[in-house]
Amino acid sequence: MVREVTLKGMTWSDPRGYDPVVAAAAEFFRMHPGVRITWDKRSLQGFESTPIDELAATYDLMVIDHPHVGAVVLDGCLLPIDLHADAESLLRLEGETVGKSFASYRLDGHQWALPIDAATQVQAIRPDLQPAPVQRWDQVMEAARDGAVLWPLRPPHVLMGFYTLSANLGDPCAVTKGPLISRKTGFAVLQALQAMAELVDPACRTMDPIAALNALAYSPRHRIIPLTYLYAPYALEGYRPNRIAFHDIPAIGIGGPIGSALGGTGIAISARTTEPALCTRFAIWLASAEVQRGLYSANNGQPGNARAWGDPAVNAAVGNAYANTRLTHEAAWLRPRHKGYMAFQEEGSQIVLDAITGRTSHATALDALDQRFIESFPE
């Protein structure tokens, strides 16, 4: 007799977040008759801000991002993947990760999620208007003076740009308690960001990466987004009226495309689930190279597995978006993950936005960033 089980999952509403897990649930049901996984979805803004403990009270499986992990550890709302996963499977997935994706979900000796989607800030261009990517930040400024640049400034993405430029200059922001950034680098980054903010359309202040990429895809004159999270489906033919190509970030420092603020998502399991072993089996399967370069990529998914990223067929479908941004991803910077960080991310984003749009001085902003960052750590 087939055992009937229904698991509830929560993901985010973009096709990149929703379509591949729905397709995976259907295939898992075919492989395991009686095991149904239903998926709900929330907005990108909700995905970035909703506390995990709220979701864990309702769902068995959750797609999360890594800055929540510190709160997860102290709140005890997620099941450590390693409690029911075999060590060999975890070691294999760690070896197949893109950059720090696997490590971003490991804290306090446990693995709290498995990477299923790798992303960091990259460069997006319209290849019909901009045949080749730019290499340096001064080239971005030149294009901005021509009115050709879009840039998602809606929090938290304005703070992600601050992080990326800081790390690219070779002086990354702190991840432990103390001042967030050195004064010299902080001033340099705010000056660079303000110079750009004064040249782009004020509408950028309300744009997240999805809105900016949609605007780029439809625009007759914009041709570059210098820093935006990779959304590989926009590189598919026919996904939007004009295809977008993705490349390594333009450098403001001397080390090349390093230090981009890591994003991406992982599959996590609620500590309250009544099916921990089954959820773990699904999570490992979903993160596997076989699924990631197969049905996951074929259903608007953006894989987190390096074997998918290196697959010629997977790359061909998205204009080599993975190959062309691989260096940026491998050299990405890992954000703080302590409990209290998410509140700082919200406050810090507004502080940076106020500084680069002339509402407050750069000195005042840097003082506030340091103070809020230090206060964000538990006593």
Image (cartoon, grey):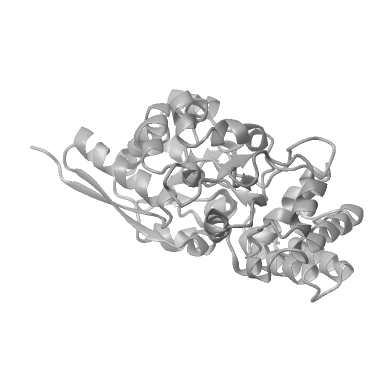
Query: Image check: 282 left or right of 145?
Result: left
Say which of 321 and 98 sits in front.
Answer: 321
Residue that extends furthest to the right in the rendered view of this protein:
184
Where residue 128 sits: x, y (%)?
A: 58, 44
The quadrant in which residue 222 appears is: bottom right
- Which quadrant of the rendered structure holds the C terminus? bottom right
Residue that extends furthest to the left in the rendered view of this protein:
1
- Which quadrant of the rendered structure holds the N terminus? top left
Q: Is 351 above or below relative to 247?
A: below
For the point 82% across and 74% down, the residue is: 360
Say which of 346 and 207 sits in front.
Answer: 207
Say which of 100 and 1 sits in front.
Answer: 100
Residue 168 seen: yes
Where residue 218 sits: x, y (%)?
A: 52, 57
Residue 114 seen: no
Where residue 102 sits: x, y (%)?
A: 55, 36
Q: Is 49 above or below relative to 6?
A: below
For the point 55% across and 36% down, the residue is: 321
Q: How many marks?
A: 0
For the point 68% across and 40% down, the residue is: 133
Where residue 202 sits: x, y (%)?
A: 68, 70
